[in-house]
Amino acid sequence: MSLVRRAGPEDAGEVLRLRQIMIDSLWGDGGGGAGEAAGWQSESLPELRRRLADGGDFAAFVVDHPGRPGALAALVAGTVEYRIGKPGNPLGRVGYVFSVATDPDARRRGYARACVEELLAWFRARGAGHVLLNASPQAEPLYTALGFTRDPDPSMRLPL
């Protein structure tokens, strides 16, 4: 039996806690600068619960914390999105991996890898032609071991 399970709406608070751990590890200030982090979780919670319940093109996979009942040890989330097909991906389905996080006291046990592998299986079952993610330098060895390669990234961002 796998340690990994699909997260449900009852896990939303813990999912947001682990997401904050990931954000803090990347940016150290809550991810948005002083003051912007306050309150985001309570605003995000209802939408996250809805998406965890609907079983659509968003999924999160988690491992329960072995030492803290009701807490999560690891998380990965992802979506399948449609883009117009192209050579190599005629169905135009693309998987996006995000929010890979492990509780600091549960690291180095393979939990994040197990969660990512489960998400990759979920992407395959939905016909995704490829999977994209952004990797921190610390996480890059995990993704490389799973077969990910670096792409030149021409992305740009517009805050709305």
Image (tube, rainbow, N blue to C red):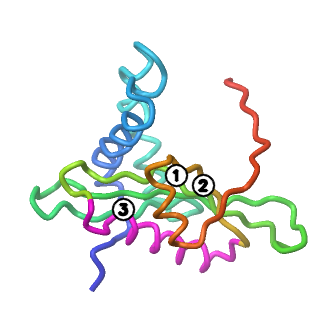
Label 2: which secondary element: loop
Disc 2 marks a residue whose amino acid type is Leu
Residue at (21, 57) in percent of width and height: 106
- Looking at the rendered image, the disc whose residue lies closer to the viewer, 3 or 2, is 2
Residue at (59, 72) in percent of width and height: 147
Residue at (37, 63) in percent of width and height: 112
Observer-nearest of 23 and 160: 23
* Relative image position of residue 125 (x, y in whole percent): 60, 80
Whichever of callouts 1 and 2 sits on the residue coming sooner in the sequence is 1
Whichever of callouts 3 and 2 sits on the residue coming sooner in the sequence is 3
Q: Which residues are magenta?
A: 108-128
Quadrant assignment, res 39 = top left
Residue under numbered circle 1: 98
Observer-nearest of 12 and 120: 120
Disc 1 marks a residue whose amino acid type is Phe
Whichever of callouts 1 and 3 sits on the residue coming sooner in the sequence is 3
C-alpha span from label 1 to label 3: 14 Å
- Looking at the rendered image, the disc whose residue lies closer to the viewer, 1 or 3, is 1
Residue under numbered circle 2: 133
Q: Are marks 1 and 2 in contact (CB under 8 Å)?
A: yes
Residue at (18, 60) in percent of width and height: 65
Asked if the stretch drawn in magenta spans residue 109, the answer is: yes
* Relative image position of residue 57 (x, y in whole percent): 59, 62
Residue under numbered circle 3: 7
Q: Image height check: is 82 above or below 98?
A: below
Q: Image height check: is 36 above or below 92?
A: above
Label 3: which secondary element: loop
Disc 3 marks a residue whose amino acid type is Ala
C-alpha span from label 3 to label 2: 20 Å
C-alpha span from label 1 to label 2: 6 Å
Quadrant assignment, res 73 = bottom left
Q: What is the chief secondary structure element of the magenta stretch? A: helix
